[in-house]
Amino acid sequence: MHKLSVIAAAAALLAGCTMAPWYHRPEAPVSQSFPQGGVYATQPGQPGVAPSGRSANGAAATDIGWRDFFVDARLQELVAIALKNNRDLRVSVLNVEAVRAQYQITRAALFPSINGVATESRTRVPTNLVTSPSNPFSVYNVELQASWEIDFWGRVRSLKDQALAQYLATAEARKAAEISLVSQVADQYLTMLAEEDLLQVTQNTLKSAQDSYNITKLQFENGTAGELDLRSAQTVVETAQANLQSQARARAQSENALVLLIGEPLPQDLPQGLTLDAQNLLTDIPEGLPSDLLARRPDIMEAEQQLLAANANIGAARAAFFPKISLTAAFGTESLSLGGLFKAGTAAWSFVPQVTLPIFEGGANVANLNLANVEKRIEIANYEKAIQSAFREVADGLAARGTYDQQIAALERNTFANQRRLDLSDLRYRNGVDSYLSVLLAQTDLYSSQQTLIQTRLARLTNLVDLYRALGGGWIEHAGETPRPADAPVDYGAGSAPVAASAATAG
């Protein structure tokens, strides 16, 4: 009895071990800090830099809810609708559920399987071998069957670890998809606002150009203006007309893209929105250190979980070289008649230990191990690239954030100067001091500078949104909330935003 206890304890100890390599997180292949100096030295909130919007007060992006980052009530409602309805996000959530089920299937191999079996067999034997009263005869059997692979070398446990890592990677992918959706809705909404501003500028330019053209045409008909002035005025009108159609098309297509993101037509009862200039996003979210991204970016955590899965798969490939030990047992009753199944003396049992030792597999086990090692190196490269990509996204966002305010200030001064230039040129032309060419050039330059200013304002806002995402923001709705687990189930019932039904337990 003591010997059996020792054997059972040894089996349990060995079953808890695997042959997977000891995991070491690869070194981050980026600098220890984000770039400094130059355009990076003029970040909002730094000493000597004038504030350009609301302050994050030192809070990290992951601690800032998207309702705190955006102040536009219309945009907030659109984000909430998208989180409830977006089909790509819904697929990501369902993928988590599917991989969770696959993990549970793999984990089940660690435990014995027990089945109840009832059989009837009809047999006829040669006459000279008959030993039973009847020939042919029937045998009835009812039994419990149990089978279990003793995981001495950790093969099943390594496969379970691999499935768990893949499940966690899928959960992080879902989290990345949700964060990305928040920024996509915001970017598309801001783009639509910019298209509306461009439409308004073009309509104003067209009205001004049409008025100038009507005056010039009247002067041409009266002989006080040449055809060159008339055709010059006409070019501005036709250019504005063409741009008006192009921008109306872009505005409609921007709305279509937004409808696709939110997963339903734009509701009629949306709150009143703000203009592009009034968005007032948080402008000084601290970037922290590149090492912080390892815990803030779900795409990096996804890549690391894929690396852990590949590492565990090496353990399973190594264990395949060693004997596989399985136990099969059955206990029940067996009788030649159905009515005698449960009578005394019909008990039957069997116990079949089995050891399978791989001797010749045609090189399959070696190839599987080589493949597992190559796949791990691939996942190391993918993990390092995810870190590099995240570093680049944040660095690009910081470079842009340090330059847009000054660029927009210069463009505003340029637009003001072009407006004054147009007013003065038009006054000189009407007084006969200058030709219409100066008016035409001033009008064209003003129109161009107005468009550039709107596009740059849009670029600044979308950069702030994308930097918020790049730093890991967008997972929580309100500041101070406890972040949901990445694999939290989603309730798509009542309410404007998805609600975690309960903390998911993979088991």
Image (cartoon, grey):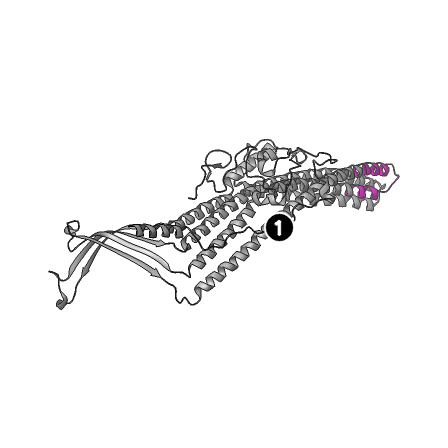
The image shows a total of numbered marks equal to 1
Rendering coords of residue 319 (x, y %):
42, 58
Residue in front for this viewpoint, 316 or 246: 316
Is residue 209 in sight in this rendering? no
| Between 461 and 204, the one nearer to me in the picture | 461
Describe residue 78's horizontal placement relative to residue 142 as left or right. right
Q: Position of residue 175 (x, y in %)?
A: 52, 43
Q: Residue furthest left?
A: 133
Q: Position of residue 14 (x, y in %)?
A: 40, 53
- Asked if one can make out residue 23 in the rendered structure from this viewpoint, the answer is yes
For residue 66, what is the image quadrant?
Answer: top right
**Predominant secondary structure in magenta?**
helix
Residue 249 in the figure: left or right of residue 150: right
Assess disc 1: are there few (<14), some (14-19) or many (≥20) residues with their C-alpha within 10 Å of its C-alpha: some
Give the amino acid type for the residue marked by disc 1 in the picture.
Gln
Helix or strand or loop: what does disc 1 sit on?
A: helix
Q: Is residue 416 left or right of residue 370?
A: right
Image: magenta residue range? 418-444
- Residue 424: say if magenta: yes
Q: Is residue 163 left or right of residue 302?
A: left
Residue 325, located in which quarter of the rendered image? bottom left
Residue under circle 1? 388
The residue most toward the front is 2
- Give the residue displayed 18% in from the left and 59% down from the top: 122
111 drawn magenta = no
List x then y, in percent, for residue 146. 29, 52
Q: Locate the C terminus by quadrant.
A: top left
